[in-house]
Amino acid sequence: MLRLYRQAVENDLYAFEITIKESNLFIKTCRDLKTIAFDTLYKIRKDLENYILKSRVFLVSLSPIKQDKNAPDIVKKMIKASSDVDVGPMACVAGAVSQEVGKVLLQYCNECIVENGGDIFLKLNRDASLGLYVGKDNPLNDLNIILKKSNKPYGICTSSAKVGPSLSFGASDVSLIISHDAYFSDCLASACGNIIKNDKDLQKAVDLARKYKETVGCCFVCNEKVAFWGDIEIGGL
C-alpha cells in the first residue's frame, strides 16, 4: 500500500521503514536504528503470533477477555487496556506494536516517531503538528493538531470506518485519541469510532473520551463536521 501521508512528515530526524509480514512501520529517529527496530519488531511479532496459536479468543474477541498471567507482556498490556475501555484486545495491536518498538528506540535516541498504520508513538523535544487525513478530496484534510512538547511520549491513534483497514462499527471519517499510552489511545479510538453512526453522535464520542483521565485530547470527524476536546490546538478550520 502506498502511504502518501508519510511523505508529509517533516523534521530533521533520520527516516526509514521496516516490514515484517503485515507490519509496516515508518520510523524517524536521531540516527540509523533500523537493525534495532527490525529485531524488536521481529520479537514482538513472534510473541503475538505464538500466543495467538494458543488462544484464538485473543485474536477474534470483540469484547474484553480474561487476563492471563502466563502471557507475554505485550499481550497482558493489550488485555488490560482493552478491558479498561470495553473492546476486544486486538483493538490496540497497532498502537501496542508502535509503543513497544518506540520504547526500545528511546534507549538509543531521545526523540522518535513510530507510525504503524496511522497509530503513532511519538517523543519529540519540541511541539508537534499533526495532520489529519480524512479521505480523498475531503476539505477537512487541511485540519492539523498542535501538540505541546511533553516529557512523556504520546500515543496518537486513529480509527476510521472509511479510511484504512480499521474494524469499526460506526461511520466516522476519523476517531482520534491522544494520550500518553498508545495501547489506551488505540482502544479508545475504536470505542469512540464505534458509537459514531452519524454526525449527531460526535458529542457522544467526545463525552466518552472525556470520561477517562488518561485522555489528553480527541478529535472526531463525520460528514464534514468536527468535534474536538482537550489540551490540544486545532488549526486549519
Image: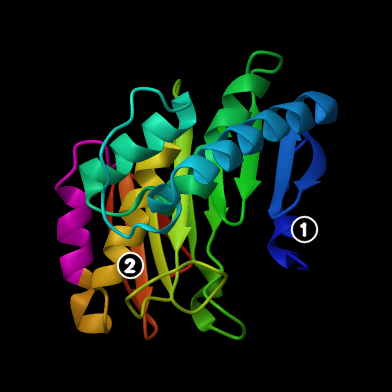
Is residue 94 left or right of 3 when viewed as pictured?
A: left
Q: Is residue 25 magenta?
A: no
3D distance between C-alphas at marks 2 and 1: 26 Å
Residue for point 79% across, 43% down: 18
Q: Tag 1: residue type?
A: Gln
Residue that protrudes farthest toward the front in the picture: 54
Q: In the rendered structure, which segment of residues is drawn in magenta?
A: 203-215
Residue that protrudes farthest toward the top in the picture: 107
Residue for point 16% across, 67% down: 204
Q: Tag 2: residue type?
A: Gly
**The disc label shown at residue 7, or none:** 1
Please state the horizontal and vertical placement of residue 62, each as a whole percent of the image: 32, 60
Q: In which image quadrant can residue 34 be found? A: top right
Secondary structure under badge 2?
Answer: helix
Residue for point 27% across, 84% down: 198
Please state the horizontal and vertical placement of residue 180, each as a whole percent of the image: 39, 33
**34 shown above or below 207:** above
**Quick one: 75 or 70, which is closer to the camera?**
70
**170 shown above or below 64:** below
Q: Nearer the viewer, mark 2 or mark 1?
A: 2
Q: Residues within 10 Å of mark 2 (few under 14, many from 20)?
A: many
**Quick one: 54 or 218, which is closer to the camera?**
54
Please state the horizontal and vertical placement of residue 118, each as a whole percent of the image: 57, 56
* Count of numbered badges drawn on the protein: 2
**190 shown above or below 10:** below
Q: Is residue 214 magenta?
A: yes
**The disc label shown at residue 193, or none:** 2
Secondary structure under badge 1?
Answer: helix
Label whose residue precedes the other's in the sequence (2 or 1)? 1
Residue for point 60% across, 42% down: 49
Is residue 151 left or right of 136 when viewed as pictured?
A: left
